[in-house]
Image (cartoon, rainbow, N blue to C red):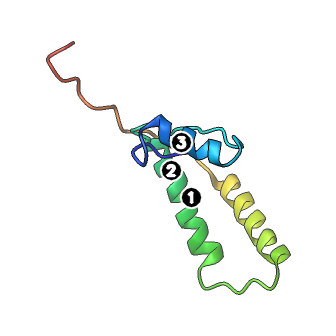
Amino acid sequence: MVPRGTHRAQAVWQAFNVRHGNRFHFHFTPLHASWVNQIELWFARYTRRVLRHASHTSTAHLRERTERFVSEHNQAARPFKWTFRGYPLQGGAS
């Protein structure tokens, strides 16, 4: 996934891909990606509850803590109420 605005020119990404053997298929995120905010909130909570100040004894221990976090999150999850209604139309169109 490529955030828009980093390199808008498609030629830049095509040249990058050619240099790396055409191994990549790029997916561009929307310009106004309010949905990304939700995953950022999820990762912030994950960081606070699982990663920060933690001493994981092994990769298996980290995996166990992560799976427990995901399970607990999914059990308590509630639908998100979207409040953003979009930007008002400009130019007087109705």
Nearer to us of marks 3 and 2 is 3
Q: Is residue 44 visible?
A: yes
Q: How packed is label 2: few (under 14 Cα within 10 Å), some, or many (20 or more)?
A: few
| Structural distance between the alpha carbons of marks 3 and 2 | 27 Å
The residue closer to the viewer here, 58 or 30, is 30
Residue position marked by numbered label 2 in the rendering: 38
User: Do callouts 2 and 1 mark residues in contact (Cβ within 8 Å)?
Assistant: yes
| Picture quadrant of residue 91 | top left
Nearer to us of marks 3 and 1 is 3
Residue position marked by numbered label 3 in the rendering: 13
Residue position marked by numbered label 1 in the rendering: 42
| Structural distance between the alpha carbons of marks 3 and 1 | 29 Å
In the image: residue 54, left or right of residue 58: left
Q: Amino acid at mark 1?
A: Trp
Q: Outermost residue toward the top?
A: 94
Q: Which residue is pictured at 39% across the width and 39% down the height? A: 32
In the image: residue 81, left or right of residue 67: left
Where in the figure is residue 34, as x and y percent of width and height? Answer: 43, 43
Mark 3 or mark 1: which comes first in sequence?
3
Q: Which residue is pictured at 61% across the width and 67% down the height? A: 46
| Picture quadrant of residue 33 | top left
Where in the figure is residue 28, as x and y percent of width and height? Answer: 52, 38
The residue closer to the viewer here, 55 or 76, is 55
Is label 3 in a helix, a strand or a loop? helix
Where in the figure is residue 1, as x and y percent of width and height? Answer: 58, 45
Where in the figure is residue 73, as x and y percent of width and height? Answer: 66, 58
Is label 1 in a helix, a strand or a loop? helix
Mark 3 or mark 2: which comes first in sequence?
3
